[in-house]
Image (cartoon, grey):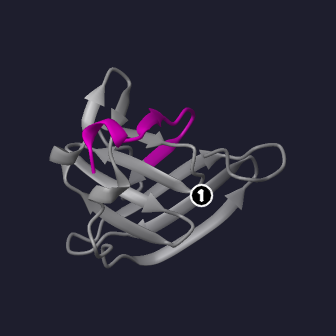
Amino acid sequence: MCAQNKPVWKPVEFAIVKIDDGPPKSWNMYHTEKRGVLLLRVWKRYLLIDMNQQEVYDIDPATITAQADNVTWSPADKPNEPLDITEWKQRDVGTMGRLRFRLPKQGAVVEVQLPLLPTGKPAY
């Protein structure tokens, strides 16, 4: 878990993020080479979204380091337990893939739309 071993997460281009059907005032999304795993920053909160396992983790912002447009964060800092999310729905909508899930406690619905490659596979 050395700082120099933290992978660099690059911004996702052309993503759309909605919280309860509206755009958040401040957000960004990041990806690494591993497809289907995204890091979403909404305000000061970071969520690790694993679309392959259908899990979402609340990430401690202190474990993330901003570097210009990129961030560094190590999966070794991932919490042991995912959030208790509900209503996970994933589907392709034309040239976009859409994911919706409901967060626990406050119950906000998070929607993420990502571009698909011409092959129909996710770009990220």
In front: 8, or 30? 8
- The spot of residue 68 in percent (x, y) is 33, 20
Density class for disc 1 (Cα within 10 Å; few <14, some 14-19, many ≥20) is some
Residue 85 picture quarter: bottom left
- The spot of residue 24 in percent (x, y) is 32, 43
Question: Residue at horizontal 32%, vertical 65%?
Answer: 57
- The spot of residue 60 in percent (x, y) is 19, 54
User: Is residue 73 one of those drawn in magenta?
Assistant: no
Residue 8 picture quarter: top left
The region drawn magenta spans 1-17
Q: Name the residue under label 1.
A: 98
Above or below, 62 against 12 in this view is below
- The spot of residue 124 in percent (x, y) is 60, 46
Q: Is residue 117 left or right of residue 37?
A: right
In front: 33, or 18? 33
Question: Residue at horizontal 44%, vertical 40%?
Answer: 30
Question: Residue at horizontal 51%, vertical 43%?
Answer: 32
In front: 119, or 87? 119
Residue 73 picture quarter: top left
Q: What element carries label 1?
A: strand
